[in-house]
Image (cartoon, rainbow, N blue to C red):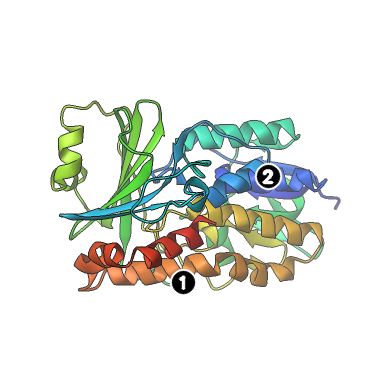
Amino acid sequence: MKPDVDVLVVGGGPVGLAAAIEARMRGLSATVVEPRDFPIDKACGEGLMPGAVAALARLGVTPDGHPLRGIGYRSAGRSVDHWFESAARGGGSAGAGPAGGDSGGLGVRRTVLQSTLAERASELGVRFVEAKATALEQDADGVAAAGIRARYLLGADGLHSTVRSLLGVERPPARSRRFGLRQHFRIDPWSDLVEVHWTPAVEAYVTPVGDGVVGVALLGPQGLNYAGALAAIPALASRLEGVTAVSTLRGAGPFRQRTRRRRIGRVLLAGDSSGYVDAITGEGIRVGLAQAEAAIACIAADDPAGYEQAWAQCTRDFRMLTTGLVGLAASPLRPAIVPLAAALPGVFGAVVERLAR
């Protein structure tokens, strides 16, 4: 049976839309299947590292947001800042202010990012179908889901991926289960940094996402109390006292998702659906965009088997650094993370720059 489309993308989030754009840029037809109304919101930190901004620009996507010039770690009485190299040309370094140049990163509301990607996909002729893929069938020549037959299917349907479940490639969940909560507040950003406030139980990611709007995402154990956790961070509690929340509280998790394989036959997985470590390093979007590019490159070459190696290569740094930081954060050494980063600003900056790319 002749396929209806070259690439069927299940999932209309940023990674799925990026994959559809990649397909069109390579001359392949693409259809996105998504049951939810656009724009799609999700609890996330909303800070795009410089590498993610560059990857989006390559796709012709330039969302509106607030410039991000670096990352700052905070704990009781200690702090360390690293300004992205693109923001510190001319002599800036960890702990010093930027000396000029572009900001590099960008704080962007998730709804804005998804809408901008969807607009670009539409411009390139991507077809959108409002449906849910609840089953899939594949043979040597194609794969079918949601009533559509394609040469290839890309599952990009998030942490709790239906496609991943249908493929049967899930590994048992990790014993340590971390979750996230996010809300936005009507207040002028007081910094061009993503501030990460460390407490004994949670990390609070403070990201300026636009004029007069700041997002605060908390990462921690299941059942964490958002208001209570914020109140336990005096530097944030004082700034947000009496400030109006401008979005509903959203949650996500558990973060850790493990897979045995990222490809079976003509079905490939990208983004959170392909496996995820944690949001602690803030690079989910950048890694997801790299996976989308790698997956479509393999599809365009009719080499789906090559995707496993490509996936491993483009996620290696993220998996290693994130796993290490999560392990450290869950250990008795957690209180030493910020003091250690402040004592070794060069090492802290090198890690940030590695992830920023």
Secondary structure at numbered mark 2: helix
Identified at 40% across, 70% down, the residue is 323
Residue at mark 1 to residue at mark 2: CA–CA distance: 26 Å
Q: How many marks?
A: 2
Q: Which of marks 1 and 2 is nearer the N terminus?
A: 2
Q: Which of 212 and 82 is in front in this view?
A: 82
Residue wearing tag 2 = 58
Is 287 located above or below residue 323 in the figure? above
Q: How far across and how far down the image is residue 101, in percent?
A: 52, 42
Q: How far across and how far down the image is residue 318, in percent?
A: 49, 65
Rate crowding at label 2 as few (under 14), some (14 to 19) or many (20 or more) other CA atoms within 10 Å. few
Q: Report if residue 36 is visible in the image.
A: no
For residue 324, side relative to residue 333 (left or right): right
**Image mark for residue 320:** 1
Secondary structure at numbered mark 1: helix
Identified at 60% across, 52% down, the residue is 289
Q: How far across and how far down the image is residue 340, in percent?
A: 27, 68
Task: Give the quarter of the image for residue 73.
Answer: bottom left
Q: How far across and how far down the image is residue 326, in percent?
A: 34, 67
Q: What amino acid is found at the position of numbered circle 1 in the picture?
A: Met
For residue 173, side relative to residue 166 (left or right): left
The residue at the far front in this view is 90
For residue 103, side relative to residue 305 (left or right): left
Q: Nearer the viewer, residue 181 or 185?
A: 185
**Image mark for residue 241:** none
For residue 23, side relative to residue 194 (left or right): right
Q: What amino acid is found at the position of numbered circle 2 in the picture?
A: Arg
